Amino acid sequence: MTAAALDRRPENRLVDHFEQGLEAPICLTWELTYACNLSCAHCLSSSGRRDPRELTTEQCEAVIDELQRMGVFYVNIGGGEPTVRPDFWHLVDYAVAHQVGVKFSTNGVRITPENARRLAATDYVDVQVSLDGATAEVNDYIRGPGSYDTALRALANLHEAGFRDAKVSVVVTRQNVGQLDEFKAIADRYGATLRLTRLRPSGRGADVWDELHVLPEQQQELYRWLVAHGEDVLTGDSFFHLAPLGGPLPGLNLCGAGRVVCLIDPIGDVYACPFAIHDEFLAGNVLGEGGFAGVWRDSGLFRELRNPQSAGACSSCPFFDSCRGGCMAAKFFTGLPMDGPDPECVLGHSETALLGQRSVPPASQDHSRPFATRNEPVLVQLQRRRPAAPPVSACAESPLAGFQPAPTPR
Amino acid sequence: MPTPVQAAPVLDVAASPRLARSVSVRPERFGALLYDFRTRKLMFLKSPRLAHVVRLMDGTTTVGDCMDRAEVPAGERGPLLQVLHHLQRIRMLTDHPLPEGGPEERDTP
């Protein structure tokens, strides 16, 4: 028996274990604050303003203590922009001191040379700088003016401080999918690793998904690129819905929501995954009696997710085993049935459903700023207005001028 | 000891490595998870017996002894040694003795 054969024995199929849930999440995202200096058009958490109920420093420390007890290896800290929390650096140090590694996502605003040196001094912290365009033009279109320069300055500071292997984190969109080689070159330039993830229609992403998500022919291009660059590029396992294009990509090819991953939001609410900040996927709160461990182990929602899921309309698809119906959040936020195909199903199985009647669920939280700011992206599309009727001049004398007869019923 | 016929390289049963200090272990129903903070690599030990063997490896006991103590059946030893070899290759396992004067340092392949 070879090691590969050992893997294939039914009791050793990792996927099955993962679907039943683990003792503690492997990949835990913790949004520390809803406050953000940017207002990215596709923000998953609709961030902008701090929530007055956000966890205090002491409450955050208690969460870290609990993660340590549960054996959570590391947390992915995000936001909002986590570094704008005044206690951010303290919490990073606290986590590291408690054997909880930290990977944090930032737009780079506080990655000064000094902070970069501090980050370079430990193995237990990893930094992900978000960049959604390989040029300022493409990036700033959705992240806002100046955000490209901020991100590149942060990468340069990290590189100069000797920080090894930062991540350049890119959400793949219709506008930047043609820049993958350039992104790779930027990452290489700063001794960093490129990380590509999928655009989700979550948070403000729901408003711009139709305009930003990659087109079917671009999916092919993306898939080929991912296959060609395989191990050099991280994906957060987010492209498993592309597997039917020619076989699974490296990584876990399944939805880990509530089984392998989950999210803690700034007020301590626990959601099934980072892309599902919505009441529908709310499992509990870390301030509740059983704490985070209690929510992870016993919440009704997570128990339900760990039961075998119905493949529904996908059950007859020969590729179901590799894509497993795609992303739950993507289906939910585009108003598609949960037991049907992903909205970006590469076989086109969701096309009819997307065109048909569907109701997109209203957001259950929004921390966007109420008014536009100076550096807010403005997604403008030039459109020709098509008047419903020929223009009528002010001096038209005909008694029927401007009259639009109602269509006669047949 | 006869040379194993498998193509994939295996760890020497006479070796006595231990987990690198940058590696954290978490027991799971299927075995265990290993995470290396230095390389940020996550590994899955896909059987409780394999996890048991790894737990027993203290830098002084040989892999063979660990497998005996974990009662690993003969048929499973080959695949298990392949996994251990991989862990050694990615330096989650180390031959370096602990500072408190461990065993003699061995050469790694």
Image: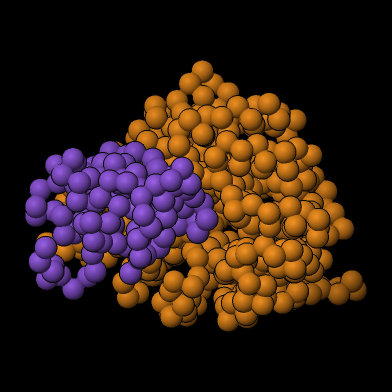
Chain colours: A orange, B purple
Residue A138: x percent and y percent?
70, 74
Which of these two is toward me, B81 or A408?
Answer: B81
Residue A254: quadrant of the picture: bottom left
Which of these two is toward me, A299 or A332?
Answer: A299
Q: Is residue A81 above or below residue A173?
A: above
Q: Is residue A182 above or below residue B91?
A: below
Q: Residue at image x 23%, y 56%?
A: B14
Instruction: Say if residue A118 shows up in the picture.
Output: yes
Instruction: Say if residue A223 shows up in the picture.
Output: no
Q: Residue at image x 35%, y 33%?
A: A303
**A224 to the left or right of A118:** left
**A201 to the left or right of A142:** left
Q: Residue at image x 75%, y 74%?
A: A136
Which of these two is toward me, B73 or B59?
Answer: B59
Q: How many numbered dots are placed on residues in this image?
A: 0
Which of these two is toward me, A111 or A124?
Answer: A124
Residue B61: x percent and y percent?
27, 46
- Image quarter where the N terminus of chain A lies is bottom left
Residue A274: x percent and y percent?
53, 47
Most extreme residue toward the top is: A289
Residue B40: x percent and y percent?
50, 56
Q: Residue at image x 65%, y 67%?
A: A132
Most extreme residue toward the right is: A395
